[in-house]
Image (tube, rainbow, N blue to C red):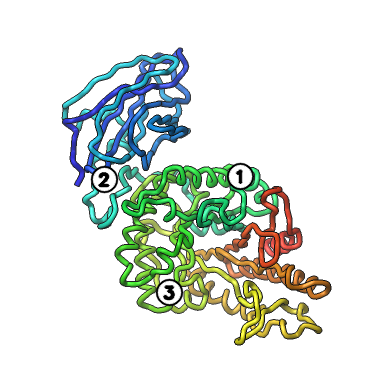
Amino acid sequence: MFRSISKYLLMWLLCLCVPSAFAAQATMNIVNDWGQGFQGEVVVVNDGSTAISGWSVEFDMAVDINNLWNGVIVSHVGDHYVVEDAGYNESIQPGGQVSFGFTAIPGNASPVPVIVNGDGGSSSSSSSSSSSSSSSSSSSSSSSSSSSSSSSSSSSSGGRFPNYNINPLPADMTGMSSSALDIADNITLGFNIGNSLEATGGETAWGNPVITAEFVGLVKQSGFNAIRLPVSWNQYADQATAEIDLSWLARVRDVVQYCVDNDLYVIVNIHWDGGWLENNVTPERQAENNDKQRAYWQQIATYLRDFDEHLMFASANEPNVDSAEQMSVLLSYHQTFVDAVRETGGKNAYRVLVVQGPNTDITRTNELMTEMPVDTVSNRMMAEIHYYTPWQFAGMTEDASWGNQFFYWGAGNHSTTDTAHNPTWGEENDLNALFSLMKTQFIDNGIPVVLGEFSAMRRTGQLSGDDLALHLESRAYYHRFVTQQARAYGMLPFYWDNGGTGNFASGIFDRPANTVFDQQTLDALMQGASN
């Protein structure tokens, strides 16, 4: 339970760094404290006669801030925090005020010495033992959170972790007018920045450089207009509290910003992430995983809430489901995702959400995914499947007793000399039959389908000469045909790029050099998207 400490309201002066021509002050209130953590609020007041455009505050506090809204932490060194405006609230008119809120650990917060080192601005400090109405000077969106966010609420917090939905906002449709169908109409061709933000051990652990604004710009310039960001969260979270490291949330936000700055749609998901969810779609793990799913999405959704409709959220990646019983569990994970995002409010009340079919396999999705999660708003949901069919062509790396690899694919691309590696199934007719299932099941019922991943790897280390040339032409045709038919059946194709440029890789770009590496594949994708 939250322990109200309104009669123990702590207020002390912060430094407000604004030009000396302005007069401003800031006070901090401890709004709620539940023992293990607390909720704080900072109110910045313009006492001058001139409007303030852009503000920042600094304070020293021996706590770990794990969530912050209506502001941006731009520096945290030791106990010293610097918080700046969030852009939309940079202006403070004379006599006006803005506020930001945060949660931090540990709880039982006490006043700390205040360092005032701004260029100017008036200052005052006070303490208060008044009732909860003493914090009414905060913005309505922040003050409302103290009454609506209670860690004891089972509907919001789950049984294992704190409730991270501590600042739900009123629904805000600004920049969110497009339905899922509208956005689907706008997406031509998507690109996965794979093996980066989801990499175990850190963003560069799987050999790719950090994602830069320049790289995202290259993706846009090359003809893509949407990006899927596979993201790992579990390795950056405290397993006892499910609290995600603030610096990681900030890093993901930066990459999302690169995308939005380039007018790209962007999907942020919880990827494989060590398999905590997708390898455990079972009744035994259902309650535990729903608690974690809720905690993670409350934090992700809150931290990224201010982006407009260009940002979409995706519940999972490739959840392993083989039965109706498991499908029921998966549906509960998706429902938790939808509920957690929606309850944070603001733009998230209307954000398009993407839910994955079992294994993101078309056949299993058609057989088992007979319903979608319940939503509080209409026409704001998409389904997701992946396509690596036939696997012998897309990803198999050695012949097996049950069958050989396929080096070639499609009409006119079979080898007359290496017939053992010609495909025996999974070509154009099979693809059309599978894509048709998704059209009938979802698209014809007004639910767009994201083809979230597809690609066939290069076999430059296996083949040479004419065989390699035919293989590469087969790859190009495969990528062109998948893209073309996905669009023909109403799906949104996202190419899987793992950043690699060697054997068994699928990278289109040389990411370290920030140049196009595989022009043949890029051209094929663009041709498919234009048909």
Which type of secondary structure does the marked residue at label 3 adopt? loop
Label 1 sits on what residue type? Thr
In-image side of 501 versus 50 (left or right):
right
CA gap between label 1 and label 3 equals: 35 Å
Going by the numbered disc 2, the residue's amino acid type is Ser
Q: Residues within 10 Å of mark 1 (few under 14, many from 20)?
A: some
Residue placed under numbered mark 2 in the picture:
149
**Picture quadrant where residue 57 is located:** top left
User: How many numbered callouts?
Assistant: 3
Q: Along the line of sight, which residue is nearer the eye, 360 or 89?
A: 360
What x and y, as percent, mark residue 397? 64, 74
Residue at the spot of label 1: 212
| Upstream in sequence: badge 2 or badge 1 | 2
User: Is disc 2 surrounded by few (<14), some (14 to 19) or many (20+) residues within 10 Å?
Assistant: some
Q: Earlier in the sequence, mark 3 or mark 2?
A: 2
Q: Is residue 481 above or below residue 118?
A: below
Instruction: Using the image, determine if residue 267 lies above or below residue 277.
Output: above
Mark 3 → mark 2, Cα distance in angstroms: 34 Å
Say whether residue 525 is left or right of residue 439. right
How far is disc 2 from disc 1 in space, using C-alphas?
A: 36 Å
Amino acid under label 3? Val
Q: Which residue is mark 3?
A: 321
Residue 363's x, y, as percent?
51, 78
Q: Residue furthest right?
A: 465
